[in-house]
Image (cartoon, helix red, strand yellow):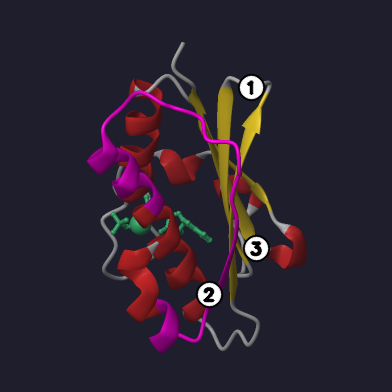
Amino acid sequence: MALTVVELEQQRVLMTTHLSRSPLQVYGSEVQLQQVVLNLILNALDAMCAGDQVLRRLAITSEVVRTDYLVVSVEDTGPGIATEDMDKVFNAFFTTKDKGMGMGLAICRSIIHAHGGQLYVMPARYGGATFVFTLPGVG
Ligand SMILES: Nc1ncnc2c1ncn2[C@@H]1O[C@H](COP(=O)(O)OP(=O)(O)OP(=O)(O)O)[C@@H](O)[C@H]1O
Ligand SMILES: [Mg+2]
């Protein structure tokens, strides 16, 4: 999140976090997991800043479920994803951006799968997108 502070300010996006207070140890690559969160945040910024959207909010939450599962969500107030594209966004080379590669989410999903978790998307309140990933705790 710290890596995007400048972008958030430039693009007038308000980020709120609601993070779990009880820590959960997960096994994995710190750099890869950082890449996942960074990709999700950058996608959210792209989505909210593409149009003349006034409400630009990014909400990040983490929660420990059943004491052994971490659930992280990244929710934006952008235009959201069309129902027919909901599955396609994770495909390699699927992009709706002029300069997009369409690799971000495909890489995110393979990283999360390699860590024993799941990555999916659902419609957010106010019409945006909510990306959610899970990670199993150690033990
Ligand atoms: N938060 C979001 N809101 C709306 N659409 C999204 C969001 N995140 C992803 N998408 C859609 O999913 C597509 C694929 O995203 P993905 O990150 O895989 O590739 P990209 O951002 O287009 O390019 P890059 O390879 O540079 O990440 C995007 O082009 C966009 O259409
Ligand atoms: Mg991307």
Q: Which mark is residue 108?
A: none
Give the magenta part as a residue range.
8-37
Residue at left offset 61%, top offset 44%: 20
Q: Is mark 2 within 8 Å of ligand 1?
A: yes
Which residue is painted at 49% across and 21% down in the image? Answer: 136
Q: Amino acid at mark 2?
A: Met
Secondary structure type for disc 2 = helix
Report whether 30 appears left or right of 132. left
Q: Residues within 10 Å of mark 2 (few under 14, many from 20)?
A: many
Q: Which residue is mark 2?
A: 48
Q: Are marks 3 and 2 in contact (CB under 8 Å)?
A: yes
Ligand 1 within 8 Å, label 3 CB = yes
Relative to 118, residue 138 above or below: above
* Kind of residue at disc 1: Thr
- C-alpha separation, residue under disc 3 versus residue under disc 2: 9 Å
Residue occupied by mark 1:
67
Q: Quadrant of residue 9?
A: bottom left
Circle 1 — which element? Answer: loop
Q: Tag 2 or tag 1, which sits nearer the N-term?
A: 2
Label 1 crowd (10 A; few <14 / some 14-19 / many >=20): few
Q: Nearer the viewer, residue 42 or 24?
A: 24
Q: Of discs 3 and 1, which sits in the foreground?
A: 1
How many C-alpha atoms fall within 10 Å of the one at disc 3: few (<14), some, or many (≥20)?
many
Looking at the rendered structure, the kind of residue marked 3 is Gly
Image point (61%, 61%), residue name: 80
- Mark 2 and mark 1 in contact (Cβ < 8 Å)? no
Q: Give the distance between the C-alpha atoms of the residues marked 1 and 2, in whole angstroms.
A: 34 Å
Q: Nearer the viewer, residue 65 or 78?
A: 65
Residue 48, position in %: x, y? Answer: 53, 74
